[in-house]
Amino acid sequence: MLDTPGEVPVTRDTPASRARGGLLVVGSFVVLLFAIELVNTFMLHGLNRVFGLRPRSADGILDIFTFPLLHANLNHVMSNALPLIIFGFLVFMSGVRVFLTAVACSWLGSGVAVWLIGAGGITVGASGIVFGLFAFLLVRGFFNRNWWQILLSVVLFLAYGSMLFGLIPSFMGFVSWQAHLGGAVGGVVSAVVLRVRSAARRG
């Protein structure tokens, strides 16, 4: 059907359009992380000292919003890049609102956990968001009573379940289990929030 003059074309939200949008958004975010790491490397990782998260410090509250964008080195970025793309893309397929809610809750949950119970030093990295998106994908199907989402969560658990060991307190100082735990809690919270909103709209 042809559009008549003066009418605004309707953009249909199809799985294909969501897939393209998901790849664009998540891919752009990962590219941004690599670009920041490149600049940070030339600055001898001076950005980490300014914008990295310091537990229980007054200025550390603002660093909650910046520390996932920074990393210790290129390998650190690469270790987060692939799961970010996979989990982020799968979450985005449920819609922009779902994606933004899951990322925001994971980001904030990770930062608040590090600020409250971090062991000290400076924490950087997007792994808290990775754990948050993973946790969201694992639990949302049970809240939504959606068998396809539950099946996806089982497949993801079988493929990436070993990641959950990252929630256990570790003696390795370079691994922030606090960020992982906070991000995972944030992911579960986002699933609950989205379920409540969905039930309220139906009510």
Image (cartoon, grey):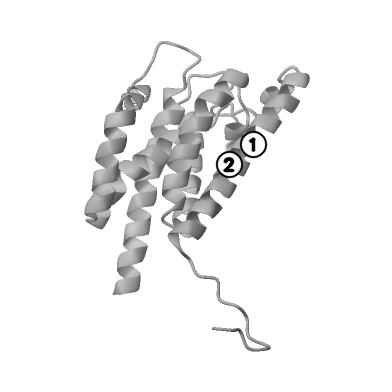
Position of residue 131 measured from the top left corner of the image (x, y, whole percent):
41, 34
Q: In the displayed image of the protein, which residue is found farthest to the right?
A: 42
Q: Between residues 180 and 62, which one lies in front from this camera angle?
A: 180
Depth check: give the residue in front, 56 or 23.
Answer: 23
Residue 192 in sight here:
yes
User: Residue 67 occupies which quadrant of the picture?
Assistant: top right
In the figure, 149 relative to 202: above or below?
above
| Circle 2 SS class | helix
Disc 1 on helix, strand or loop? helix
Residue 138 quadrant: top left
Q: Quadrant of residue 186?
A: top left
Counting from the top left corner in percent of width and height, residue 50 is at 70, 27
Inspect the image, locate mark 2, and give the three-letter code of the amino acid beneath it.
Answer: Gly
Label annotation for residue 49: none
For this rendering, which residue is in front, 16 or 117? 16
In percent of width and height, residue 150 lies at 24, 47
Residue at image position (37%, 57%) is: 194
Tally the numbered discs.
Answer: 2
Q: Which mark is residue 31?
A: 1
Residue 115 visible in rendering: no
Give x and y (percent) for residue 93: 43, 53
Tell me the CA gap for discs 2 and 1: 6 Å
Q: Which residue is mark 2?
A: 27
Give the residue type that dot 1 points to: Val
Residue at position x 50%, y 15% from top? 174
Q: Specify the quadrant that holds the C terminus.
A: bottom left
Q: Is residue 198 above or below residue 150?
A: below
- State yes or no: discs 2 and 1 in contact (Cβ < 8 Å): yes
Left or right: 37, with 117 as reference point: right
Crowd tier of the residue under label 1, counting other residues whose Cα lies within 10 Å: few below 14, some 14–19, many 20 or above: few
